[in-house]
Image (cartoon, rainbow, N blue to C red):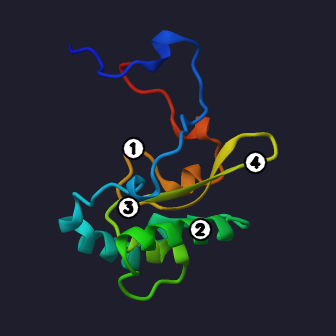
Amino acid sequence: MRAPPYLPFLNGPLSLAPGLRPIAPEAWLCPDTEAGAIEEKRALMRDRRGEVYGAREGSELAALELAAAVHAVAGPAVGDWPSALEGAASAVSDDLCVLIKDSEGLWRLEAGSLCAPTFWRLDEKLGEPLGGLHGPVPGA
């Protein structure tokens, strides 16, 4: 069995705070290496909206801010979409999730367009704090 390549918890206590630091505005959205799969993603967004899109009340302004940032880099929405977040998600192959810091200082998943999750569903995690999004990793 090979050692995991990244073990940040070995150098101190476990922290569930996102490791945020400023980056250049033009570097925040990586080049789209999965562009070949974007039509399949858009089909999922159209045909299975209830499974791949969700937004809690109060997340609209943050979703609009994310959409504007995505469109500034990736271009306009492809097609007509019911929400700004879905329009932004139609322009990139990446899943887009909106985390908002609550009154207790916890980052919560408040909205998302999630077409390629790894072992979780948006409807199960919407509203959860960041610590609730990442359960134990089997074998770790």
Disc 1 packing (10 Å; few <14; some 14–19; many ≥20): few
Instruction: Determine the secondary structure under disc 2.
Output: helix
Disc 2 packing (10 Å; few <14; some 14–19; many ≥20): few
Residue bearing the label numbered 1:
119
Residue 39's spot in the image, x, y percent?
25, 74
Instruction: Determine the secondary structure under disc 1.
Output: loop
Residue bearing the label numbered 3:
115
The amino acid sitting under disc 2 is: Glu
Q: CA distance from mark 1 to mark 3?
A: 12 Å
Residue under the point 51% across and 36% down: 134
In the picture, the quarter occupied by the C terminus is top left
In the picture shown, does residue 67 fall above or below 122?
below
- Judged by depth in the image, the label closer to the viewer, 1 or 4, is 4
Residue under the point 52% across and 72% down: 68
- Judged by depth in the image, the label closer to the viewer, 1 or 3, is 3
Precedes in sequence: disc 1 or disc 4: 4
- Judged by depth in the image, the label closer to the viewer, 3 or 4, is 4
